[in-house]
């Protein structure tokens, strides 16, 4: 159902508040540069520090902009892109309410992270996702990122969840290609395997993945879209060329906690007015800013 280059969209802030104008500009930037799906309010979107009102507003703004006419584009060049809204929480009722809102706001899908901090058992995770899926008729993409949540959504649990009609895929960010292979083997190719790691998009596609929900696409959307497109057209050498071109950038996006590097890079490139973050995330160290500048200089030279 969902495929291609999907951006894990940053949330721009200005003097402590969500910058709605810049948020709309970013959506238009992605539409113009070939991004296939917009994914607001995920980890990269700093959902953990958004109030419920802000979370809902960001989702509404992105949907409004993504489904309208892109700024500066008319006729056959204008296109609309789907929106998968991040609606996860470690509180099942909160996740349920956010998912209901996404459905009402017109989202095309919901990205729901495994409950963090609670450390639920596989049974608890199954019941969490089952409850939301049964109460909200919206396509759901599971989100597995053990490095953030301290729990791993096992392939066997994913296989059970894939039998629920509106659970359509998983953003797999364990970095484990064996686990990704197990998911495809157990769930089949009608269930969307989506890479959650920019480093391994190419091998994930080779395993049967449908695309990526990407951090680095905030900075280089055309290149990430090209990587997926070239692979899907069978141009493996070209896809590999793009992979190695963006690989240093992918690594640089994680020299500090995401989204510190990507917001810093976007500000350096003029895509954001400011790399403003919310505590407990802090500005990038000067040492790492210099490293990031070097990677950007090499990329664009």
Image: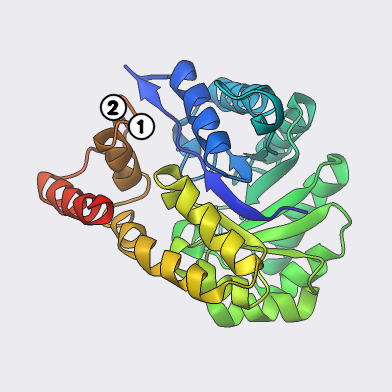
Label 1 – label 2 distance at C-alpha: 9 Å
**Residue occupying image coordinates x 57% and y 44%:** 34
Q: Position of residue 96 (x, y in %)?
A: 73, 38
* Rendered residue at 52%/23% (across/down): 24
Residue denoted by label 1:
271
Residue extending furthest toward the front: 76
- Viewport quadrant of the N terminus: bottom right
Q: Quadrant of residue 284?
A: top left
Front one among 234 and 285: 234
Query: Where's residue 267, x and y in %?
Result: 28, 33
- What number is the disc on residue 94? none
Observer-nearest of 260 and 222: 222
Which residue is rendered at x = 86% and y = 41% of the image? 137
Q: Residues within 10 Å of mark 2 (few under 14, many from 20)?
A: some
Quadrant of the rendered image containing residue 107: top right
SS class, disc 1: loop
Q: Would residue 120 be visible to someone looking at this image?
A: no
At 50% from the left and 37% from the top, the residue drawn is 47
Q: Secondary structure at mark 2?
A: loop
Q: Give above or below for 262 relative to 190.
A: above
User: Label 1 neighbourhood size at 10 Å, few (<14), some (14-19), many (20+)?
Assistant: some
Residue 95 shows in the view: yes
Circle 2 is placed at which residue position? 274
Tags 1 and 2 in contact by the CB under 8 Å rule? Answer: no
């Amino acid at each position: 159902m969902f495929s291609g280059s999907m951006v894990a969209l940053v949330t721009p802030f200005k003097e402590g508040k969500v910058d709605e104008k810049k948020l709309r500009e970013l959506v238009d930037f992605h539409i113009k540069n070939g991004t296939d799906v917009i994914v607001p309010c995920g980890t990269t979107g700093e959902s953990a520090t958004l109030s419920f009102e802000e979370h809902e507003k960001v989702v509404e703004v992105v949907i409004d902009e993504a489904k309208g006419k892109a700024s500066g584009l008319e006729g056959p060049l204008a296109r609309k892109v789907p929106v998968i809204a991040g609606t996860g929480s470690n509180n099942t009722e909160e996740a349920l309410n956010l998912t209901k809102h996404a459905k009402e706001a017109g989202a095309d899908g919901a990205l729901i992270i495994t409950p963090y901090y609670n450390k639920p058992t596989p049974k608890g995770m199954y019941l969490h996702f089952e409850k939301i899926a049964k109460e909200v008729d919206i396509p759901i993409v599971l989100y597995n990122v053990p490095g953030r949540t301290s729990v791993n959504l096992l392939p066997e649990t994913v296989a059970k969840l894939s039998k629920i009609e509106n659970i359509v895929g998983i953003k797999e960010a364990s970095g484990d290609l064996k686990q990704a292979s197990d998911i495809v083997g157990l769930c089949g190719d009608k269930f969307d395997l989506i890479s959650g790691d920019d480093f391994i998009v190419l091998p994930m596609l080779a395993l049967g993945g449908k695309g990526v929900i990407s951090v680095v696409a905030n900075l280089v959307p055309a290149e990430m879209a090209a990587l997926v497109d070239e692979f899907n057209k069978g141009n493996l050498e070209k896809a590999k060329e793009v992979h190695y071109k963006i690989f240093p950038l992918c690594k640089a996006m994680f020299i500090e906690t995401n989204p510190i590097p990507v917001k810093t890079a976007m500000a350096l490139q003029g895509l954001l007015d400011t790399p403003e973050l919310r505590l407990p995330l802090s500005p990038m160290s000067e040492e790492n800013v210099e490293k990031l500048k070097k990677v950007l200089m090499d990329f664009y030279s």
